[in-house]
Image (tube, rainbow, N blue to C red):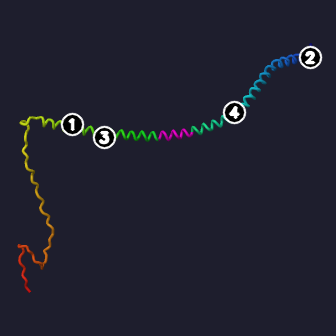
Amino acid sequence: MTNPVIWLGLSILLLAIGLGVLVCVSVPTLIGLARAARSAEKFFDTLDRELPRTLEAMRHTGNDLRGLAGDMTDGVSSASNIVQQVDRGLSDVRQQADQAKRATRSVAAGFTAAWRVLTKPTSSRKRKKRRPPTARPEKPPETAYKPTAAPSTEKSSDSTLEPRSNSR
């Protein structure tokens, strides 16, 4: 077995068997790969037809969502304003209710006191003597500066004035 030709023949035989096994195993793999290629080709054709319409619909949807978001912002701000107005109105109503409550209590207390006075027997009522109002001290008359006037030429009908003499 030292002949190299035998070793060469044996090597070629083993190589041929290996190639045969490789071809037998690779044929089903190549068939599966061909099926996958056809399927991918169909998918890419469908994608090429449907993707532009889908992207356009997504753009429209995005624009619609932007518009709705703006409307929602406006709605939320107007709702906030309405809530503030209602809050102010409620506080005003509370204040008015408190004022009405106080006024009602005052009126009720007045009616109760009047009823008690009216239902007491006449003999038990104490009659108070009315005193005349106290006299207030009068203010001293304001004295205005009255300069002494030069004798006038008019005749006065006042008897307290001294008669004037006409000397020339």
Percent of width and height locating residue 29: 78, 21
Q: Amino acid at mark 2?
A: Gly
Name the amino acid type tagged 4: Glu
Q: Label 1 sits on what residue type? A: Ala
Residue 147 vertical placement versus 137 (above, below): below
Quadrant housing the C terminus: bottom left
Task: Give above or below for 55 relative to 129.
Answer: above
Asked if the magenta segment contains residue 48, the reply would be no
The residue labelled by disc 1 is: 108
The N terminus: image quadrant: top right
- The magenta region covers 66-77
Q: Residue at x 38, y 39 (%)?
A: 87
Q: Depth-wise, is mark 4 or mark 2 nearer the camera?
A: 4
Q: Nearer the viewer, residue 151 or 18?
A: 151
User: Mark 1–mark 2 contact, CB under 8 Å?
Assistant: no
Tag 3 and tag 2, C-beta contact below 8 Å = no
Residue 130 is left or right of residue 17, and the answer is left
Q: Does label 4 or label 2 sit earlier along the sequence?
A: 2
Q: Under tag 2, what secondary structure?
A: helix
Dot 4: element: helix
Q: Which residue, given by chain and number where applicable, does mark 2 sit on? A: 9
Tell me which corner region of the image, top left, top right, bottom left or bottom right, holds residue 63: top right
